[in-house]
Amino acid sequence: MEVNTENFLLIGAVLLFVAVLAGKLAYRLGAPALLLFLAVGVFFGYDMLSFNSPELTQFIGMIALSIILFSGGMDTKLSEIKPIVVPGVVLATAGVLMTAVILGSFVYFLSPLLGIELTFPLALLLAATMSSTDSASVFSILRTKKQGLKENLRPLLELESGSNDPVAYILVVLLVGMLSPNKESVGAGASVVLFVVQMFVGAVAGYGFGRAAVWTINKINISNPSLYSVLLLAFVFLTFSVTTLLYGNGYLAVYIAGLVVGNRKIVHKRTVVSFFDGVTWLVQIIMFIMLGLLVDSRALIQPQVLILALCVALFMTFVARPVAVHVCMLPFRKFSKKARFYVSWVGLRGAVPIIFATYPLVDSVPNADLIFNVVFLVTVVSLVLQGTTVSGMANTLGVAKTERESSFGDAFQDRMKSAFTEVDVNEQMLSSGNTLKSIALPDHTLVIMVCRDGDYFVPQGGTELHLGDKLLILSDRNEELQAHYKELGLDEVIKF
């Protein structure tokens, strides 16, 4: 069925609705929601929707990854990643290169046995697309399952997955440039220089744009709080695009910018974080559905493709990734053997490898269709095999710990009957005395914070109040409190 302007919104709405229901089903089954998002795309793409645009998929994937990486960086606390920043960076750089070389060599020697002729650069390109762990999958699964981990493993995995995409991206771009008939190949020396420049410019630009975003948000003074989220989203795209124009790596830049913003005080931070949580899920759903729509399900079931993909998935899971992780973590003896094995196990593949696999399609690289189909199947195997066992493997290896959840996180909006109000201190309130304990308030009512000339503090009974002080009051007797406000002549009451 061809998608036209009349039914585009309807089909889009149905896809999103089905994907959300699939996500709920995945949570109950203990499966990664991202896997069922892919399944939704494949299902609708099989004789129902006509979609074959690697360029559009690549563009949407670029937008989605920018938001996902920024949001992941914003949710990462620097205090948590400081102890593991060195092993995280080693895994994100040397680990990616080692995985690509080991896996590429395996594909090169295996493919002739299956009747597939792949040169070593083509085999290396196939491996490079899958050499990095997928940030969307790791962030989504670890946080959805609220998986607590010992030995600082969770921040290590999130740092690795958030920062290793640039290395894989550079590898893919260099190899595509070497193999594409439409591009000039780049020499080894130029490749090294390009790699260093992209990483350096990306890191510097990310930090600079992150600081600029914090300064702008805190100084701009917008009357509508919702626009702060829109402003920060603009900074995400500005960071990626300008960094790319400066020959830096945009993905690294947005991740570092997210780290900077998330670890500094900004106004309306709760609103901004909530906005990015929602947008991140939206772009993940859209990205995975489009990747599912793009794949040709008939080509996936070809025996050569199935066997090659299964062999690659198993070799990467049980050989290439574990070898790369254990070699990279040899200098870091504080990690136990069980922790190292767990890091190698949570080498999830997801949307990023499939998006990288669209680059050979766009640039007409030989065997690009085979590369895309194999990468898609390997991603499915990874999400099924590793994604469903994130918690189980942690418990089996003894690296799991109970993650304490806040009892009040959702209560403020959903179940708590107590109400917050804000009032200004007037003369009538101070008629019986100028201390907090002199003010008559209903039972089960507390003044929990005072704002005076822009400064905030928690009051005590003997705290002196001044005219114009703003009081944040929490009460279980809201109706009684409202009546009391009228007696005190307080007509302007802000309710939360």
Image (cartoon, rainbow, N blue to C red):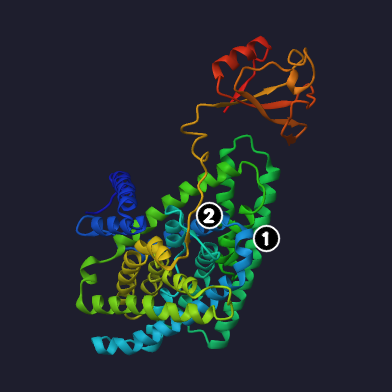
Residue in the picture at 58% in, 73% down: 334
Q: Say whether disc 1 or disc 2 marks the residue closer to the N-terminus.
A: 2
**Depth check: 156 or 452 in front?**
156
Within 10 Å of disc 1 (Cα), the crowding (few <14, some 14-19, many 20+) is some
Amino acid type at image mark 1:
Gly
Q: Residue furthest top?
A: 487
Q: Secondary structure at mark 1?
A: helix
Q: What residue is pinned by disc 1?
A: 208
Crowding near the residue tagged with mark 2, few <14, some 14–19, many ≥20 C-alpha atoms within 10 Å:
many
Q: Is residue 118 above or below residue 145?
A: below
Which quadrant of the figure contains the N terminus? bottom left
Q: Position of residue 448 (x, y in %)?
A: 66, 30
Q: Position of residue 407 (x, y in %)?
A: 51, 40
Q: Which residue is depicted at the point 50% across and 27% down?
A: 417
Among the 4 quarters of the image, the one containing residue 393: bottom left
Quarter holding residue 287: bottom left
Q: Which mark is residue 71?
A: 2
Residue 185 position in % (x across, y down): 48, 84
Answer yes or no: is residue 175 visible.
no
Is 362 in front, or is 133? 133
For label 2, the SS is: helix
Q: Is residue 128 left or right of residue 16?
A: right
Find the distance from the CA under tag 1 to the CA under tag 2.
17 Å
Q: Looking at numbered disc 2 in the image, what kind of residue is underneath it?
A: Ser
Horizontally, residue 469 falls left or right of residue 115, namely right
